[in-house]
Image (cartoon, helix red, strand yellow):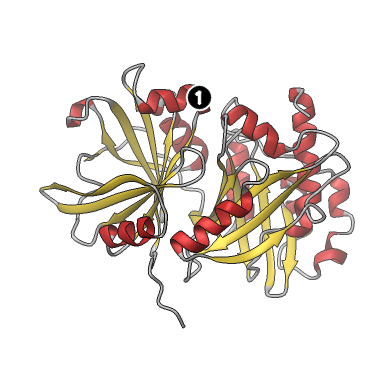
Amino acid sequence: MSQDFLPLKGTDYVELYVGNAKQSALYYQYAFGYELIAYAGPETGVKDRASYVLKQDKIRLVLTSPLHPDGEIAEHIQKHGDGVKVLALWVDDAEQSWIETTNRGAESALEPKTLSDEFGEVKVASIKTYGETIHTFVERNNYTGIFLPGYQPRSSTYTPQPIGLKYIDHCVGNVALGEMNRWVEFYETVMGFKLLITFDDEDISTEYSALMSKVVSNGNGYVKFPINEPAEGKKKSQIEEYLDFYRGPGVQHMAIATDDIIHTVTELRKRGVEFLVVPSSYYDDLLDRVGKIDEDLQPLKDLNILVDRDDEGYLLQIFTKPVQDRPTLFFEIIQRKGAKSFGKGNFKALFEAIEREQGLRGNL
C-alpha cells in the first residue's frame, strides 16, 4: 500500500467572505445554533477585517468582512457575493503538506508561516484550488488558544441552542463545463485523493437540464469533495446558474452531518431556514424504493426529508435554499445510517425542485 503523502485529520475550519460578518454571525447563531467563540478585528490589532469564529461540535465557521472598500476581501465579495474562500485542512505538518502539494503542481497561495501568541504557535500554508477557493493547511499541535493567534475569545449575549450539527460530511465545488476532470485529476495527483464515485448526465438529469459529478476522497475518508460541472440540456442547469451569479467556480454547498435529522430540521424550520420542496408524491412509493427504515414516514414527509439507500445502508438528507440573495451557496443536512453514498436516488427529485426555484427567479 502506498504511503499517504498528505495525511489529513479532517476539516479544520471553513472561512466565508461575507458582506456583513457581524450580522451573518448572528444569523448562523440564531438559525443554525452555532456558538460564537472567537473574534479578530480592530480591537485585537487586525486593521483590515473583522472575523467571527462560530462553533458547533466539530464544525468551525469563520465569517470575515473587510473594513475598507479595496483589497482582496472586498473584491472577492464584490465579485462573488457571500461565499466560501478557505477550506482549511487539519494536518500534523503544514510545511510538509505545502511542499508535497506544490511539488506535485499546486499553485501556492501562502508560503508556510508560523503564527504565535502566549498560547503557543500554529503553522499555516495555503494552495489554490478551483476558482478563488484555497486550501489552508493548519498545524495546531503546539497551540492551546481558542482558535488561531490573533483571535481573542468572544461570546454573545444571545445564547444559541445547538441543533445537533456534528461535523462537515462533504463540501461540493461547482466548476465550468469541461473542467471537472481537470480538478478531479488535481485532487488525485496533487493531494493523493482517490476517485470515489462518478455520476453522469444519465444519473442526474431532468427533462430540461443535467449535471455531471465526481466525488474525490482522501485516504481515511475524513475529507470528501464532490466536483460538479454542467451537462448539455434544453435549458440552463443549476450549475450554470451558480457559475453566472458566483461569477466563476466555487463551493456550491456544505453537507453537515447530524445524528437526528428530524430534530435538526424541525429546529431549522422553526428558526426560519427555508428548504427546497419536493412534491408529496415522492413519499408515495418511498418504502418500496428504499426498503425498511427506522424512522416513521410521516415526520419525514412533513419536513420534506429525502431518503436513499446503497449497499451499506441508507441516508436521510435535505437541502436548504441559498442562504444569501444570489442563488449560490446553500447547505445540506445529512444523517447516514450506514450509507456511504450521496443520495443518487434523490437527484431527479432534487433537480426538479431546484428547477422550480430557478423558474421563479427567471433563470431556467
Give the residue displayed 72% in from the left and 74% down from the top: 311
**Vertical placement of 302 versus 259: above or below?**
above
61 or 233, nearer to the observer: 233
The kind of residue on which mark 1 rests is Lys
* Horizontal side of residue 226 vs 153, given as left or right: right
Relative to 328, residue 111 above or below: below
The residue under the point 31% across, 59% down is: 99
Circle 1 residue: 79
> Which residue occupies the foreground of this view, 119 or 28?
119
Regarding residue 57, the answer to whether it shows in the image is no
Query: Percent from the top left, x then y, of residue 130?
Result: 51, 44
Determine the secondary structure under disc 1.
Answer: helix
Locate residue 319, reporting x and y percent. Answer: 66, 45
Q: Image point 66% across, 59% down: which residue? A: 342
* Residue 330 visible at all: yes
Q: Is residue 236 above or below residue 360?
A: below
Q: Nearer the viewer, residue 20 or 66?
A: 66
Direction from residue 50 to residue 275 in the image, left or right: right
State the image coordinates of residue 138 (x, y, percent, origin top left): 30, 54
Local crowd size for mark 1, using a 10 Å CA cut-off: few (<14), some (14–19), many (≥20): few
Provide residue 258's location: percent of width, then percent of height.
Answer: 55, 57
Q: Quadrant of residue 43?
A: top left
